[in-house]
Image (cartoon, grey):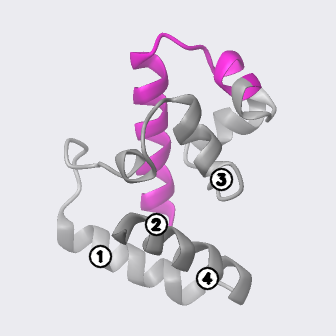
Amino acid sequence: MKKIRLLLGKRIKELREKRHLTQQQLAEMVGIDQRNLSKIECGVTFPSRVLADIAKALEVSLPELFEFDHIDISSDQMKVSINDSVNKLNYEEMKIVYRLIKVLDA
């Protein structure tokens, strides 16, 4: 899950900077503390509860947040990382990932 967190954090930062927003501005739009957004962008935490809010604030769809093609990681590495991460999740975390996959698959 660490690689996914890092990639997602980089992607959120990239989209935030593209829209000329500071961390403080985006954090306020999403309703979280700037320190929490910093942790998300650094890949320390995964924004499961505010993921949809971040996408909305950045004016992108949820699938667009996960467009990592331009970030250096192979498809095989990503699949291994996802599989390893899913195996470590508790039931509640798995439900979140399941819902996210369903949204992306729609």
Residue highlighted by disc 4: 94
Q: Considering only order in the chain, which callout, 1 or 2, is on the residue closer to the N terminus? A: 1
Name which of mark 2 and mark 3 comes first in the sequence. 3
Q: Is residue 41 visible?
A: no
In the rendered image, which residue does mark 1 sit on? Answer: 79
Q: Which mark's residue is nearer the viewer, 4 or 3? A: 4
- The tag earlier along the polypeptide, 4 or 3, is 3
- Cα separation between marks 3 and 1: 20 Å
* Res. 5 mark: none
The residues bearing labels 2 and 4 have C-alpha atoms spaced at a distance of 14 Å
In the picture of the structure, the residue carrying the numbered disc 2 is: 103
Q: Which mark is residue 45?
A: 3
Q: Residue at x 52, y 89 (%)?
A: 87
Q: In the image, what residue type sits under mark 3?
A: Thr
> Of the residues shown, which amino acid type is indicated by label 2?
Val
**SS for callout 2:** helix
Q: Amino acid at mark 1?
A: Lys
Q: Is residue 22 above or below residue 1?
A: above
Q: Residue at x 76, y 32 (%)?
A: 35
The stretch in magenta equals 1-28
Q: Is residue 2 visible?
A: yes
The one nearer the camera, 43 or 48, is 48
Pointer 2 or 4: first along the chain = 4
Q: Quadrant of residue 57?
A: top right
When the figure is inspected, residue 89 is found, relative to residue 101, above or below; the finding is below
Classed neighbour count for the residue bearing mark 4: other residues with Cα under 10 Å, few (<14), some (14–19), many (≥20)? some
Q: Nearer the viewer, residue 79 or 102?
A: 102
Whichever of callouts 4 and 1 sits on the residue coming sooner in the sequence is 1
Toward the viewer: 71 or 95?
95
- Tell us which disc is closer to us: 2 or 1: 2
Q: Are marks 3 and 1 in contact (CB under 8 Å)?
A: no
